[in-house]
Amino acid sequence: MIALSDIHAGMSVVGADGHPVGRVRSVEGATRLLLEDTPADGNTHYLPTSHIVKITDQVHLDCPAATARTLFDQDLPAGENTT
C-alpha cells in the first residue's frame, strides 16, 4: 500500500519508463498530486494518485511518462483549472 504521507514537495515523479513527468508541488487529498515544472510544457498540472506504484526518493508511476501526461488535469471539479 502506498503511503501518500511519504510524498513531499520537490520530489521527482517518473513514469514506468524512467522518464520524468514533473515535480511534486503538493498532495491534494487522497486523489491527486499537484505537479510543477512538467517537461511537457513547464506548467502546473494535476495527476491522479491511483497511478503511483512506489515511493522511494522519487514517485514512481505504473505507466510511461507519455501516458501519464495524457492523464493531466482529468476529472477536475467544475470551474477549477490549473492556470
Image: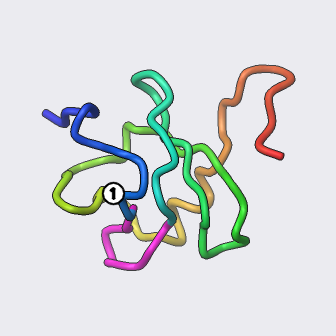
Q: Position of residue 31 (x, y in %)?
A: 45, 27
Residue at the image point whose x is 30% and y is 56% from the top: 59
Residue at image position (83%, 46%) is 83
Among the 4 quarters of the image, the one containing residue 16: bottom left
Q: Nearer the viewer, residue 81 or 5?
A: 5
In this orientation, which residue lies closer to the viewer: 81 or 50? 81
Q: Nearer the viewer, residue 6 or 66?
A: 6
Up the image or down, 67 lies above or below 5; here it is below
Q: Is residue 19 magenta?
A: yes
Report if residue 41 lies within the magenta region: no
Please give the name of the residue rendered at 42% of the width and 48% of the height, measured from the top-left corner: 9
Which residue type carries mark 1?
Leu
- Dot 1 surroundings within 10 Å: few (below 14), some, or many (20 or more)? many
Q: Residue at x 49, y 34 (%)?
A: 32
Q: Tell me where residue 76 appears, x and y as whole percent.
A: 70, 29
Q: Position of residue 73 (x, y in %)?
A: 67, 43
Q: Quadrant of the N terminus?
A: top left
Q: Is residue 77 above or below residue 64?
A: above
The secondary structure type at the circle numbered 1 is strand
Which of the 4 image quarters holds residue 36?
Answer: bottom right
Of residue 14 and residue 63, the one placed in the foreground of this image is 14
Q: Residue furthest front?
A: 9
Label count reads: 1
Q: Is residue 14 left or right of residue 53?
A: right
Colour setup of the view: rainbow
Magenta-drawn segment: 13-21
Residue corresponding to mark 1 = 61
The percent position of residue 26, horizontal first and vertical second, equals 48, 40
